[in-house]
Image (cartoon, rainbow, N blue to C red):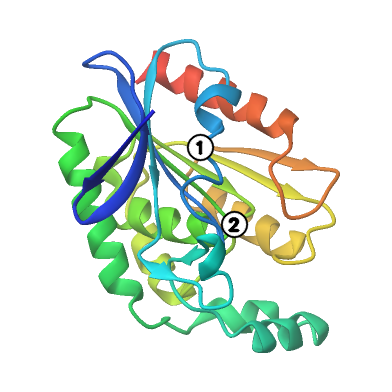
Amino acid sequence: MKFSQIAGLDIIEIEAPPGADAIVVLHGYGADYRDLAAFGVEIPVERPIHWYFVNAPFAHEELKLFGGRMWFDIDMNGLQRALAEDRFAEFFAHQIPEHFYEVADQLERLMLKLKEQHAKLFMGGFSQGAMMAGFVSFKCPSLVAGLMLFSATFIAEDIWKKCLNSPPHFPVFQSHGNSDPVLPLKEGRRLKDYLESHGFVVDYHEFSGGHQIPIEIMERAGDFISKYQRRL
């Protein structure tokens, strides 16, 4: 494991031999790049893969003493009201969070840089990190060999749908807890249905649990990566 900075972003790397495939992983809201770094040893893959765990650019004010970061700010009180009033889809549907495009552009520069070093480049994220990973991947499909969305939902839905109108170039892994109290299961299902209706092959898994990534999902994610490392 080593710490580096690429395209202005702080990164934890778990290295593989030169020429290996790679995956870029984005953590969730209020966490940091250490949160998912265990993926590098806990997700089983058949072939060596170089892991890049990226730290979000903004400090989370309430959690900054613990290293908490975020890709963009969220009105948590507004989100809780939207959940209580069954208006979740409206909450994230059409708003563009402040600095969203700047962060997406920075991640795109990172992917372009890494693409120079790796023949196959996967991308994945959890929760808010999955929203960012989805946006970047759908906007720049030629950069990605596969996308992993853990507890994901639409954000800036109008923009995503414009991106998704172009033909897909990569498969998608998606998981969601059936009792997720943060991002409702029905929104994960809606995203899955929309992707499939646009020709994406979605390896979809629901599990018994909440806003998390359990061991059985890590195993399924390892199967997904191994499958498309072989195929592409």
Number of residues whose C-alpha sits closer than 10 Å to that of mark 1, classed few (under 14), some (14–19) or many (20 or more): many
Residue 74 in the image: above or below residue 28? below
Identify the mark nearer the N-term, 2 or 1: 1
Determine if residue 29 is in view: no
Image check: 84 left or right of 107?
Answer: right
Along the line of sight, which residue is nearer the eye, 205 or 72? Answer: 72
Q: Which residue is mark 2?
A: 152
Check the image and name the residue furthest to the front: 65
Q: Secondary structure at mark 2?
A: loop
Along the line of sight, which residue is nearer the eye, 225 or 52? Answer: 52
Image point (51%, 69%), residue name: 64
Q: Which mark is residue 37?
A: 1
Whole-percent x, y for residue 13 in the image: 35, 33
Number of residues whose C-alpha sits closer than 10 Å to that of mark 2, classed few (under 14), some (14–19) or many (20 or more): many
Image point (52%, 38%), residue name: 201
Whole-percent x, y for residue 136 in the image: 34, 56
- 2 or 1: mark nearer the eye: 1
Whole-percent x, y for residue 52 in the image: 36, 37
